[in-house]
Amino acid sequence: MIRPLAAVVKATLLAMLLSGAAAWAAIPDRALDAQLVQLDRYGYNEPEKAAQQLRALAADPAHAGQRLHLDYALGRNAVYAGHPETVRRIAADLEQRPGGQPLARMLLAELQDRQGQTGRSGDMARQALEALSPPCPSQAAQAVPPNCDARVALQALRLIARAQGARGEYAFADTSLRRALALAQALQDHTATGAMMGSLAVNSQVRDETAAAQQWMTQAWQMAQGDASAMSRAKMVESMVASRRGDRNQQLAALEDALRLAQQSGGRRDVALLQNNLLDAYIHTDQAAKAVQLARLALPVVQSYNDQTVERTLRHNLSVALVLQRQFEPARREVARVLELAQGDFDPVRRALQLRELGEAYAKVGQWKEALRLYHEERALSAETARRNRDSALQQLRLKYDSEARQRDLELLRREQTLKDRELGNRRLAQYVGVGLAALLGLSLILMGVMLARVREANRRLKANQSLLRAQSERDPLTDLANRRHFLAVMDRHAKDVFTGALLMIDIDHFKHVNDRHGHAAGDAVIVEVSRRIAQAVRAEDLVVRWGGEEFLVFARNVAPDQLQLLAERILFIVGEQPVQTAAGALRVTCSIGFAHFPLPPAQLALHWEQAVNWADMALYTAKSQGRNRARGIVTVEAGDAQALIQIEADFDAACSSERVQLQTLLGPEPPGLPDSTASVESAD
């Protein structure tokens, strides 16, 4: 038996070594990484030439173990070249290969960013970052761990920060950019380090942190020395900061320096991008005719790269210049083209700025009616952006003080260890009792009874305390529902690989109005009562989780698909039929629900539980977007494989519109006549 056992051990060790080697091989070695980075930057301006060199590298047998990242580099190059079908084909291929899923999602994120879909790009990049295994360090590190794909993580964080900034979440964007900067510094990549410093400078200026912006800008300029292309980008950052400060002369001077440096480096795309930025400077220095001329020059170059993000900005600047020249009909055509390129995915920050610039242009030429309309639209967007910025800053403060929660967890662990020590002491005490019995048989019988009773009582208390500690760590203190930690434990036991059952994601409608108009005490009362009603509506075997804030999640493991609709409808009516009694008065509260049964019909494709939660959340989003007080359930999904599911997730609204996803709608209870305090809760955001 010894020799077979040794053989098993040897085979196991060999398998571990081979699997470890495969994981390391997925990340390019230092020499190849340097080549890929150089070709990536070259390909931004010359994608076709860079593609030839990348294909030659991929064909080299010496790089056979690096095909994942070579194909990923070819996909990024196709993004630069404006070939979306090629990008999707490469992403679909990567998705099917071990370790390729994060790279596939990053390619789709880059493509969406290039097409002007900034918000969707950030969401997809976050999925890619979370899918990296093992993850890269979230804090600054002196060196990148050998199994961390830092280059892909850096690219993902750049897109995430851009999406956060576009939504006005500048505090979150600052955190993402600092994490990306730490990775760039650990990689010893001076160009990427300078780029992240430049982005931090612009983000700091947007937050009116002028001193920090100046410091980051100075560091970015120092990092760029000796590289004309990097110096050009640093000057462009200087112009953006100057624009935010309202210093138009400095903006124009920095842009002209940047254009000269870009022309020296020979980058056609960089030149066109800077010409686009110069348009803005010319417009604000009363040189509209020059701006129109420059726009006509830059537009064909931008279109040759199929870069819709830059084209949107360029056409917007052109529309402003045309308004200033009183060419109103051509200006309207350019505005319509901007809306068409946006495909409904407007960055609120950028859109508010565009509306302001158009409104100011119409006001300058005496078109007051149009200027007033644009002003009101811009003010609404700006208010929403300010709210998001404030919310992100508050969330950052909450994250900062999460360490206190971790400290409480440590205290619970220490208390548990103390209880274990007491248990050991009790065991020793029982041993002493046994020794006493042997020595003093008569008297010891009495003493033993007393001591054993004390031991049993101590053990009973110990077990009760252990159960209490465990329950406290997995319950929400406000509602006494299960929390996320408990749900994760359930998923780890019952749905580790493939999720089956039903999920209902529930959101209290207009909950922010309750807190804003009636106070947090009323908000807490609403959350407690809604949680009680949900628990009353579901079956005894269903799990109700407080997912966070005003969101709840119901996991119905054994519900039949035809019964799921009835369960969702019961929750809608039990939550919304009767007002909630609070100290502020009776408040009518309704909810929105997204639900689905898994595996998704009709293909019955297997999903991980995290994907299942995401599908329920997307269904909830449609319920909220269509008026709230309703449930939206996924009936069928026309997807033959995992790649088709990913494409649907990337643009769920389009999939619903094209009936690739069929949804059913259940309406909540009709509103009765209620006091004004209740009506305020229902008002639209």
Image: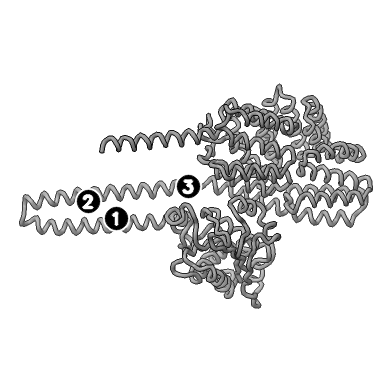
Residue 462 is tagged as 1
Write the residue at 62% across / 58% down.
618
Question: Which one is nearer the viewer's eye here, 523 or 68?
Answer: 68
At mark 3, the secondary structure is helix
Which residue in the rendered view is the most extreme toward the top? 226
Q: Are marks 3 and 1 in contact (CB under 8 Å)?
A: no
Residue hosting label 2: 426
Name the residue type under label 1.
Leu
**Alpha-carbon span between mark 2 and mark 1:** 11 Å
Q: Report the amino acid beneath label 3.
A: Glu
Question: How packed is label 3: few (under 14 Cα within 10 Å), some, or many (20 or more)?
Answer: few
Residue 517 visible (yes or no): no
Residue assigned mark 3: 404
Look at 65% across and 75% down and name the residue there.
671
Q: Upstream in the sequence, badge 2 or badge 1?
A: 2
Mark 3 vs mark 2: which is more N-terminal?
3
Quadrant occupied by the C terminus: bottom right
Q: Please state if 616 lies on the left or on the right of 337 as rendered.
A: left
Nearest the eye: 254 or 547: 547
Measured as percent of width and height from the top left, residue 452 is found at 17, 57
Q: CA distance from mark 3 to mark 2?
A: 33 Å
Say which label, 3 or 1, has the lower sequence index.
Answer: 3
